[in-house]
Amino acid sequence: MFARKIRVEYEKDGKKLPCPLKWLDSFSMRNFTNATVFDDTLPVLAGQMEIGKNVPLPELAAAMEDWFRRKGYVPKGSKLSLAEL
């Protein structure tokens, strides 16, 4: 649907794991940032999203990591990583 496909993973016990679809849905369904640029995000599978061409990947990663931490999804000391496929 969107122009870019990305992989979304988090680190747990030294391993990279795909973010569950529930987490990605939670981020995409809630417009908590008031940044309309994140409206162009669509969760597809666990660990995969499609995003619009104008969505800045570094800002998306920071916003998602902040949201996941506030929700208690990402363990302390864990990092979120996004990469285009």
Image (spheres, rainbow, N blue to C red):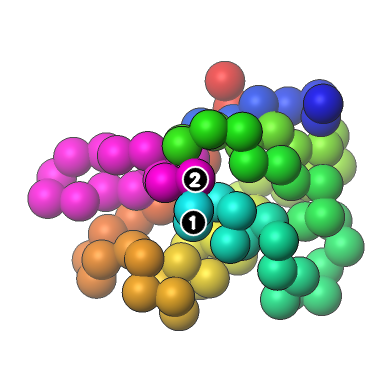
For image coordinates 81% across by 29% down, the residue present is: 2
Q: Is residue 65 magenta?
A: no
User: Does 40 appear above or below 2?
Assistant: below
Q: How far apart are marks 1 and 2 (CA)?
A: 5 Å
Q: Where is residue 29 in the image (x, y as percent from the top left)?
A: 71, 61
Q: Which residue lies furthest to the front in this view?
A: 22
Q: Is residue 84 above or below residue 10?
A: above
Mark 2 Cα within 10 Å, few/some/many (few <14, many 20+)?
A: some
Q: Residue at x 53, y 70 (%)?
A: 67
The residue to which callout 1 is attached is: 23
Residue pictured at 49% horizontal, 56% vertical: 23
Q: In this view, does 61 lie to the left or right of 16?
A: right
Residue 74 vertical placement versus 13 (above, below): below
Span of residues in magenta: 8-21
| Quadrant in which the N terminus appears | top right
Q: Residue 21, how many percent across, how many down? A: 49, 45
Label 1 crowd bin: few (<14), some (14–19), many (20+), radius 10 Å: some
Q: Mark 2 points at which residue?
A: 21
Q: Where is residue 59 in the image (x, y as percent from the top left)?
A: 66, 57
Name the residue type under label 2. Leu
Is residue 81 at least partly visible in the picture? no
Q: In this view, does 40 lie to the left or right of 73?
A: right
**17 falls in the magenta region:** yes
Q: Tell whether label 2 touches label 1 (CB within 8 Å).
A: yes
Mark 1: amino acid: Trp
